[in-house]
Image (cartoon, rainbow, N blue to C red):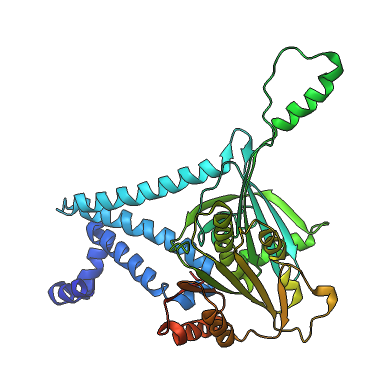
Amino acid sequence: MIAWFVNNERAIGYHGIMDVLMTDAFVQCGLASATALLVILVQSPGAIRHAFYEVFLVTHQLLAVVVLGATAAHIKLENLPQKPIIYTIIGIWASERTLRILRMVYYNVSYRGMTKVRVEALKGGACRVTFDIRRPFVTVPGRHIFAYIPSISFWMSHPFSVAMVSNKKPLLEYTPGPSPSPSILNGVEKISKHAEAEPRYSVSCIMAARTGMTLKLYNKARSSPDGVYRCRAFIEGPYGATDPLDSYGTVMLFAGGVGITNQISHMRHIIQGWAASTNATQKLILVWSVRSLDQLQWARPWLEELSRLDRNERELEIVTHVTQLRSVDESIKSQEMEICPGRANVDKLVEYHFEERIGAMSIGVCGPGVLADDVRKAARAVMNRGKVDFWEEAFTW
């Protein structure tokens, strides 16, 4: 674009360039596409995306449409040889969008209705969000979804890590037989109604109240009489890619704050594999750091549920560190997890479990940057003494 301006300024001057820009559709389309690409480049740095996420997302999508449309018109006006290329690009983009819409419809719409969401306001500035979707949700650990909640943010989608997935089906399957006698008719009616109850397919997340959509959602739930907000919603996904942890003898997971959602999905997968004897993991350790006891309740019900599942004689250890806590009294102790005051000594924990490991060891972290740095440093310190792999999951966009 700059080269075009320089060459034409020398050839026809500034006023000639203005005449071309006002009258030549070919140049106008090319300039529109180049300008849109320039704006996309300017708004691409992470600091801008994080500070104005919702504005960034809308403008980015609109600008992408402008780039494709203006480039196609630019090429078509002069019948340039790049026409098949731009049409192929538009076809790929349109196909990807169409597939995403179809998958969203599949999970969220059925003859029984549309997806509903239950948003429970929790102490510590977060919501436990459960999407009751229409069909079984197939996912693997470490994935995330995009959530659309029109009543809060009309057409914006936000990414959230999947903590728990439930694909429960009816307990009974009733098949009518010969005409029942009047004495048992009422009982058969009750069984039949229970058997025909809709299966419950759900996806659960924890959403920390930050700004924008998450803060609006949290305030909406808090202002509800029972602290629960219910509305229609849609989810899209799952997305993301993670390496399986099934082959490691020892798995050590670190989480900070809402990062527990990602690690719970890995825990659930490993513990279910224990019951089915489908993985090699012998030891599973979770270290979760939170600021207050209130934040401990974000995922405590899920952790207690996981700790009660069949372990098939494998070792499970759940340790929580509450940084603002100075001591632990009897009233907050738990049989399912160890609650410790203060910050976790990451170096000491990694060193201890490395010495007690069984087989190859995987160390993963999901949480604030400071915690990730500490875990990475501790993992590097033991890597040259045995088979240890480190991985990190970060919440960013």
Q: At 43% across and 61% down in the image, what residue appears?
A: 241
- The spot of residue 99 in percent (x, y) is 41, 45
In the image, residue 116 above or below residue 172: below
- The spot of residue 298 in percent (x, y) is 70, 66
In terms of image quadrants, where is residue 183? top right
In the image, residue 197 above or below residue 216: above
- The spot of residue 352 in percent (x, y) is 57, 83
Q: Nearer the viewer, residue 177 or 310?
A: 310
User: In this rendering, does residue 395 appear at all?
Assistant: no
In the image, residue 249 above or below residue 93: below
Q: Nearer the viewer, residue 107 or 202?
A: 202
Q: Nearer the viewer, residue 113 or 368?
A: 368
Q: At 62% across and 63% down in the image, what residue appears?
A: 213
- The spot of residue 34 in percent (x, y) is 29, 66
Q: At 77% across and 87% down in the image, what residue appears?
A: 326
Placement of the N terminus among the 4 image quadrants: bottom left
Q: Of all residues shown, which one is farthest toward the front?
A: 313
Q: Is residue 154 left or right of residue 67?
A: right
**Numbered label tally:** 0
Q: At 45% across and 72% down in the image, what residue appears?
A: 360
Q: Of all residues shown, which one is farthest toward the right?
A: 183
Q: Is residue 28 left or right of residue 234?
A: left
In terms of image quadrants, where is residue 28? bottom left
User: In this rendering, does residue 252 appear at all?
Assistant: yes
Q: Is residue 372 left or right of residue 309?
A: left
